[in-house]
Amino acid sequence: GENVEQHPSTLSVQEGDSAVIKCTYSDSASNYFPWYKQELGKRPQLIIDIRSNVGEKKDQRIAVTLNKTAKHFSLHITETQPEDSAVYFCAAESAGGTSYGKLTFGQGTILTVHP
Amino acid sequence: DAGVTQSPTHLIKTRGQQVTLRCSPKSGHDTVSWYQQALGQGPQFIFQYYEEEERQRGNFPDRFSGHQFPNYSSELNVNALLLGDSALYLCASSPWVGSGNTIYFGEGSWLTVV
């Protein structure tokens, strides 16, 4: 089955700096890669996603890049703000057969943005 | 348009008891998946229901079972509760057809087993 590795496990930055979180996946058939932000005690909230037919997607201060050949994808947050502090999870959806809708998550990255 | 709704939000059970958690998917979605998120970890896939059948299952014992109703809502049942079952249980919904559909999570049900 799919395996997703996420790094780093913790990330501490100063307000205004950029933050980068990286994930690798094992199943070359995976073709959907969402990123979730989870604040303490709350559900994971989708912040951006990318599908395998594109290499990069941007939404204001957040961008995601995908390298299907190398089987890795990354989250980039620019001009970080204290409210960006949370746990971030990457995930991959296996494709084909009956695998639709099953997400495999990374271990999470605790992002702390210091004012 | 209601999103994914779950109930109850919090509950406390004793070891050996049984629990039932409920989920209503987002309007227009016919597929419901359940995830377990232990403290400090990412969500782990339990199983998925479509057309009232279990379609996929993760690495969870038979104590975890589910059901989907004709209106697409779903239940997660856990029997013979263990302390290690304490976690946030998340319901996710999506359309069945095709891959790459956005998957929406409910607020979750916090289960504490004492």
Image: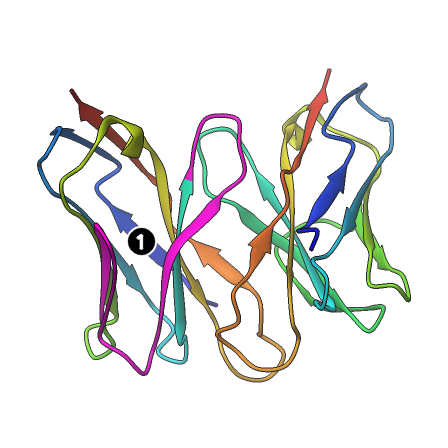
Please check the rendered image and state whether residue A104 is part of the magenta-colored stretch, yes or no.
no
For this rendering, which residue is in front, A54 or B11?
A54
Task: Please provide the residue range marked out in magenta.
Answer: A38-66
Between A97 and B26, the residue placed more toward the observer is B26
Q: Residue at x 57, y 55 (%)?
A: B104
Badge 1 local density, few (<14 within 10 Å), some, or many (20+)?
some
Q: Is residue A41 left or right of residue B59?
A: left
x, y percent for residue B85? 67, 32
Task: Describe the element under mark 1 as helix, strand or loop.
Answer: strand
Q: Position of residue B18 (x, y in %)?
A: 87, 32
Drawn side of residue A33 relative to residue B62, left or right = left
Q: Nearer the viewer, residue B53 or A61?
A: A61
Please name whichever residue, A59 or B7, is drawn nearer the observer in this view of the structure. Answer: A59
Q: In the rendered view, tell whether residue B76 sits above or below residue B81.
A: below
In the drawing, does residue B76 fall left or right of residue B32?
Answer: right
Please identify the quadrant where the C terminus of chain A is shown: top left
- Height in image: B114 above or below A25? above
| Picture layout, residue B105 above or below residue B47 | above
Q: Residue at x 70, y 67 (%)?
A: B29
A70 vs A15: above or below: below
Q: Position of residue A106 (x, y in %)?
A: 38, 50
Q: Image point 53% across, 71% down: which residue?
A: B101
Snapshot quadrant of residue B68: bottom right
Q: Is residue A49 magenta?
A: yes
The residue that disc 1 covers is A5
Give, as a three-letter code, the residue at label 1.
Answer: Glu
Residue beneath the point at 81% across and 18% down: B14
